[in-house]
Image (cartoon, rainbow, N blue to C red):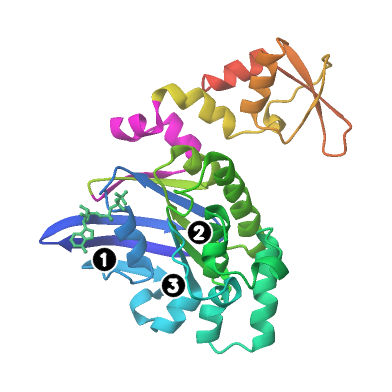
Amino acid sequence: MIEIESVTKLYDGRPVVDDVSMVVAPHTISVIVGTSGSGKTTLLRMINRLVERDAGSIRIDGEDNRSIPGHELRRRIGYAIQGHGLFPHRTVFENIATVPKLLGWEAARIDAKARELLSLFQLDPEIFGPRYPHQLSGGEQQRVGVARALAAEPNILLMDEPFGALDPIIRAKAQDDLLTIQQHFSTTIILVTHDMEEAFRLADKIAVMDGGRLLQYGRPNELVRRPATPFVEALIGTAERPYRLLALATLEEAVEAGEAGGPAMPIRTSQKDALAELLWSRREALPVVAGDGSPAGRVTLEALLRRAGGTG
Ligand SMILES: Nc1ncnc2c1ncn2[C@@H]1O[C@H](COP(=O)(O)OP(=O)(O)OP(=O)(O)O)[C@@H](O)[C@H]1O
């Protein structure tokens, strides 16, 4: 758990993070969004003390982060940034091994960890382990950067625009990988992004910052349904609201008894994807199947339209 309480950071007497309080529950993903210069990176870096706060407190699992020794903070908190920050003259294996080595892990344990992480990120350890960063694509470098941040098995992972430089296809893949890995290791993640799609895709909770202040911190559908200020509403994008609501829910919540013709969709499909399919195939309803392929009912265009409007 990360407890940020009334935290302020001043530069030249001006607050760039202004009295911010938020709690990040264990094993969840919080995403910080906001305009450029709103204090997102500064807030993130105060958690692992790359930046020192001027006021307030930050507790990591109940302990003030100032009372945790530096090496312990590095072990407990992984940090991944845009542009990956890999060491160019070290191989992928050596890059991933950096913090475990500092912590004095045995070679066999480091090797096993590096292999596990590379495999999780779908990079063959035999092929990619001995390569240097310049021998990897941008997306591969980025994945190694995140693998390196996870190498010492941190409870917490701080990520600053980790996928900012990736093309949309690779980016979506990297986001999926991150969700899988987060579930695998139960990591608590705080991620900064400019991309609202990314925020909605990954976040258990979204924090919206503007001018150093935290305007709202809530579940994605709370932000859509009840934005705290016009700024939050504008940032989410008023034209996107119906699609965001549908994207946040699966057919599990919209399925009803009955039959429908045409190809079926799995119950874990997002309501947004189901609406797209209904519109594209010009159907009024489509059959829904459970995980094992057995019939689970149907979902209707009418039900999804109701949900898109915030009711139903
Ligand atoms: N070391 C520093 N000295 C002085 N001012 C700084 C320093 N670091 C950041 N700032 C200022 O603090 C404010 C917040 O910066 P920060 O990097 O936290 O914003 P951000 O929301 O992450 O921005 P972006 O989205 O553009 O990365 C900015 O106005 C920035 O110019």
The magenta stretch spans residue 201: no
Q: Looking at the picture, how far across and down is residue 8, in whole percent?
A: 23, 61
Q: What element carries label 3?
A: loop
Does 245 sit above or below residue 162?
above
**Residue toward you, 138 or 253:** 138
Say which label, 1 or 3, has the lower sequence index.
1
**How many residues crowd mark 1 within 10 Å: few (<14), some (14–19), many (20+)?**
some
Q: Name the residue under label 2.
A: 189
The answer to whether mark 1 and mark 3 are in CB contact below 8 A is: no
Is residue 311 visible in the rendered image? The answer is no
Q: Name the residue under label 1.
A: 56
Please identify the quarter of the rendering in which residue 252 is found.
Answer: top right
In the image, is 312 to the left or to the right of 193? right
User: Mark number for residue 195?
Assistant: none
Give the CA distance from mark 1 to mark 2: 21 Å
Tell me the quadrant of ligand 1: bottom left
- Nearer to us of marks 1 and 2 is 2
Q: Is mark 2 on a helix, strand or loop?
A: strand
User: Mark number for residue 62?
Assistant: 3
Q: Which residue is drawn at 34% across and 64% down?
A: 45
Task: Please give the range of residues in magenta.
Answer: 212-237
Amino acid tagged 1: Gly
Does 213 sit above or below residue 70?
above
